[in-house]
Image (spheres, helix red, strand yellow):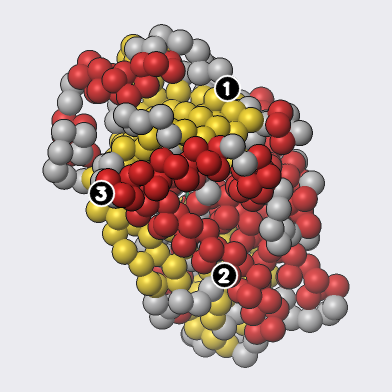
Amino acid sequence: MAKKSDAKSTAPRDTACDATFDVVVAGAGMVGATAACLFAKQGLRVGLLDSKSIADWQAGDARVSAINIASMNIFQALEVWQAMRDNRVSPYRAMRVWEQGSDAAISFDAQALGQPQLGFIIENSVIVSALIEKLRQNYNVSIMEGTSLSQRQIYKDKLVLVTEDNKSLECGLLVGADGAQSKVRELCGIETAGFDYQQDAIVTRVATQRRHQQTAWQSFLPTGAVAMLPLQDGRCSVVWSCDRAGGMDCADRLMDLSDAAFCAALSDLFEQHLGRVLECDERFRFPLRQHHAARYIDKYTALVGDAAHITHPLAGLGANIGLMDVAALAEVVNQARTNRQNIANHSVLRRYERWRKGENEMVLGMMKGFKTVFGHAHEPIKTARHLGLNLADRMPPLKAQFAKYAMGLSGDLPEICKG
Ligand SMILES: Cc1cc2nc3c(=O)[nH]c(=O)nc-3n(C[C@H](O)[C@H](O)[C@H](O)COP(=O)(O)OP(=O)(O)OC[C@H]3O[C@@H](n4cnc5c(N)ncnc54)[C@H](O)[C@@H]3O)c2cc1C
């Protein structure tokens, strides 16, 4: 904990505040930890709290993320990229996407886009570890583990937060980076609009007969999509998103299969590209839903990352747009400081909301569209889809436009994302 503030309390409680911060970030996942690093880099006093013990949480996350160039630029500016690279970062230089059982396909190559790679596959735990390590070296930062917020009160031009272990924290700005079930969002009374995809993503790691060739492979099926993402140790991370219940390849059934039967099912889908799937690790299951917060801001409070929006992982954009949120928020806060404004003024936070909400709405709409179009088994839609995919593959300018957006090389980017 940070040192106790002076006895003169500004809090509407009997006791003095236990700690005073410029910014409190709730949630120490990829997005929250990045937010804390960005604000600490500006010299602000930062409190970062997470309901779980960070070590336990990291150990339990088997996921990897496809991290785009904009996100890498943020990590580089925060001087955590080298620590990630020293661990397990796998650049991918190509992407092959096809529809199972058809000749409809599209591919992307870094070389054709004049880039050394399209992005990087990194374990979520490697990202969070590097960020937390950086934060632990900063005396402006207090990390509070195993606690959550139970109250948020507005007092003059500040917030007074009460944690579940009954500590009171005073801050100028509260950042809600506490994921899908955000407590900060609940405390602000912010509604979300969304739906359940009725799908689960099954995540595991596999060894394949042939090498992955630093390529991200994705196959679309009527029941979902299977991605094989290249890892540094030569294996692939599998993200198999599929309908929760029903046919032969539904999530319920895939989770119940023996390892050998699961590898055989995966081999059927990827044999022509990666040979047989030889072995797999433990399988984990993540329910897939989409939601978008009605507002990103409330008095002295901003939502970022999954607390504000969740989308289907089929394009690997969820964490990337969350990282872009915090880069934008940090930029407007920094401008406010330069202009000697309160960092959490409504006009400051509203600038953040206007900047990011429209961009994210577009990404969420695109993902919903892809999922709907690829989920249709009706012949006329299938035919149009195949034609569209093959046509797009033969239109390099269109492909380049789409790829550059996904890589974080175009769009309304925060300065730090430009590298
Ligand atoms: C299968 C799958 C694959 C994906 N692949 C990709 C990909 O390739 N690329 C990509 O960009 N995105 C991907 N995503 C999306 C990405 O994982 C998320 O967008 C990202 O993890 C969101 O990060 P976050 O920090 O906002 O939230 P989270 O990762 O959910 O972190 C929230 C943090 O808040 C803490 N917390 C929760 N409640 C509280 C509370 N009440 N108080 C305090 N702390 C709390 C949690 O313990 C956690 O540490 C994928 C998602 C899935 C499901």
Question: How far from the left and from the top, in percent, is residue 25?
Answer: 57, 62
Question: How far from the left and from the top, in percent, is residue 283?
Answer: 29, 30
Pick whichever, 301 or 53, lies toward us. Answer: 301
Position of residue 22 in the picture relative to residue 280 (left or right):
right
Residue type at tag 2: Lys
In the orientation shown, which residue stands out farthest toward the bottom?
Answer: 156
Q: Are marks 2 and 1 in contact (CB under 8 Å)?
A: no
Q: Name the residue under label 2.
A: 357
Q: Which residue is drawn at 69% across and 58% down?
A: 411
Q: Residue at x 36, y 44 (%)?
A: 383
Residue at mark 3 to residue at mark 2: CA–CA distance: 34 Å
Q: Is mark 2 on a helix, strand or loop?
A: helix
Residue at mark 2 to residue at mark 1: CA–CA distance: 33 Å
Residue type at tag 1: Gln
Q: Name the residue under label 1.
A: 214
Residue 165 in view of the camera: no
Q: In which quarter of the image is residue 220?
A: top left
Position of residue 247 in the picture relative to residue 71 (left or right):
left
